[in-house]
Amino acid sequence: MYNLLSGLKDYFKRQEIIIDNPIFRIHCTFTTVLLITFSMIITWTQFVGQPIRCIVEGVPTHVVNTYCWIMTTFTMPDAFQRPLHSVAHPGVAQNFEDDEGKQKHYTYYQWVCFVLFFQALLCYFPKWLWETWEHQLMSTIVCGLNIGLRSEDEKTQKKSILIDYLIRHLNQHNMYAFRYWFCEVLCFVNVIFQMFVMDWFFKGDFMSYGLNVLTFDDIDQDQRYDHMVFVFPRVTKCTFRKYGPSATIEKHDAICILPLNIVNEKTYIFLWFWFIILAILCAIVLVFRFIMIITPSLRPKLMHARNRMVPQEAVESVSRKVSIGDWWVLYMLGRNIDPQIYRDVIVEFSKKNETAHSNNPKIH
């Protein structure tokens, strides 16, 4: 188990070349590792110990355990509201034949580890898609200028290569930027989609799960019940039927303990808060991107904030005379190039771009 989890640390290695933003990495890297970790813990807990233990008379214990794990267990929802002295456990009360429609069945516990792993794949998908589209462009054009300790001749040569690339490929990076911003949108859509998937998975109990848990302490002691126990009951019932000696059907009510739900309830209360926070962060990024796209006057401020060493007039000139895709590439270069080298690149590129516009007024 330790060896499996320790292998996930490779996902947190520092990126030599940055091609995204921190929120994107939190969604695609941290959340992916988080979900895989939860899936491994639950899988390990599920198969190391017994995930279910049932008590019933007249039937071998291992048979009932297997049957109830496969065929699901249930509680009586109205029994959660009853005083504890009138029920065996929260949600566990006597049920009759006409009460079968009132039972709350639990089927999720067989699938939690698989669903968490599937969610991890969904979180990783935008990163995989962006890396496929990006095709190491940023790493290629940086040319090793992220390391400032180089000889002057080497720096001059690499700066010249980078600036020549930017001049030759002027106005050709819009698709590069739009694809990345699409992946950011995909992150937000993915978070919202997964919240609805989890709500469906838990039969409508996930969306309000965290709020109900938070309000638990504010309710009067005699009237409250733990919502985590309602969604993830520790004790449930199971009905086992078999033929008796005279070929009549015998009905056996079993009480089942689900120790795995102690892990599940903590996992999903954390995920509820985490996905709410992640949705808010992704939404803020999208609003910021929208403002950045429709407000050209904001771009030079952002570029200058990236590197205060770059003269204001240079970033103004560059931001005014390049397409938004070219601006985005230059902005991302500021994250990957040594600050002094980046200043020289922007100043020289600004001069050459001014000259190109002067020689050809049709360039936009």
Image (cartoon, grey):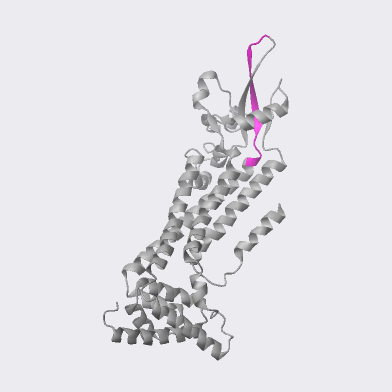
Vertical comparison of 134 with 49: above or below = below
User: Magenta stretch: dominant SS?
Assistant: strand
62 on left or right of 316 = right
How far across and down, in percent of the image, does residue 140 sit?
A: 51, 74
Residue found at the very far top of the displayed protein: 246
348 on left or right of 271 = left
- The answer to which quarter of the image holds residue 68 is top right
How many marks are shown on the rendered structure?
0
The residue closer to the viewer here, 126 or 42, is 126
Q: Quadrant of the C terminus?
A: bottom left
How far across and down, in percent of the image, does residue 270 sit?
A: 56, 51
134 on left or right of 322 = right
Q: Which residue is at 65% across, 10% downward?
A: 247
Vertical comparison of 351 with 230: above or below = below
Vertical comparison of 272 with 105: above or below = below
How far across and down, in percent of the image, does residue 326 sit?
A: 39, 74
Residue found at the very far bottom of the displayed protein: 152
Vertical comparison of 351 with 170: above or below = below
The residue closer to the viewer here, 59 or 11, is 11
Q: Which residues are magenta?
A: 246-260
The residue closer to the viewer here, 9 or 265, is 9
Magenta stretch: includes residue 250: yes
- The answer to which quarter of the image holds residue 8 is bottom right
Magenta stretch: includes residue 330: no
